[in-house]
Image (cartoon, rainbow, N blue to C red):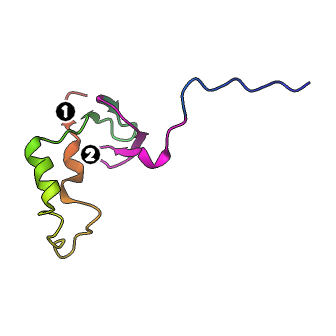
Amino acid sequence: MRRQRPRNPFPPQDHAMLKNLRCGECARLLCKAGAFDEIQIKCPRCGTLNHLKAESLTSDRRERIQEGSHHEKPAPAGRRPDHPAHARSEFVRRTDH
């Protein structure tokens, strides 16, 4: 008789909704995460303690997105449009690790 696999108590997440979280110092992939309020994770490569908080838009920023003003501007030469310059700014490097 074959044993039945126990049901997973956590619903499967859509992998398209997961976001790569990388170390702010060495850019190593630390994890893939869905929704979170706050994460603190130490990089196994360089030892940097990465502290990430959930992103939230201010009402001013929501209005600008609806207007489309920043989407109409071309990307600066030499920069990939799908990788903004501020992509690493969400990581905070702490020296007390």
Q: Is residue 35 magenta?
A: yes
User: Does 65 sit above or below residue 56?
Assistant: below
The image quadrant of residue 91 is: top left
Q: Tag 1: residue type?
A: Thr
Q: Position of residue 53 (x, y in %)?
A: 24, 33
The image quadrant of residue 96 is: top left
Magenta segment range?
Answer: 12-38
Q: Residue at x 28, y 35 (%)?
A: 50
- At numbered mark 1, what does the secondary structure look like: helix, strand or loop? loop
Q: Tag 2: residue type?
A: Glu
Q: Residue furthest right?
A: 1
Tag 2 residue: 25
Of the pair 25 and 32, the residue shown nearer to us? 32
Q: Position of residue 40 (x, y in %)?
A: 30, 29
Of the pair 74 and 20, the residue shown nearer to us? 74
Of the pair 25 and 87, the residue shown nearer to us? 87
User: Seen in the image, is 41 located left or right of residue 74?
Assistant: right
Q: Position of residue 32 (x, y in %)?
A: 43, 41
The image quadrant of residue 95 is: top left
User: Seen in the image, is 28 located left or right of residue 7?
Assistant: left
Viewport quadrant of the C terminus: top left
- At numbered mark 2, what does the secondary structure look like: helix, strand or loop? loop
Alpha carbon separation for disc pair 2 and 1: 11 Å
Tag 1 residue: 95
Q: Is residue 55 magenta?
A: no
Viewport quadrant of the N terminus: top right
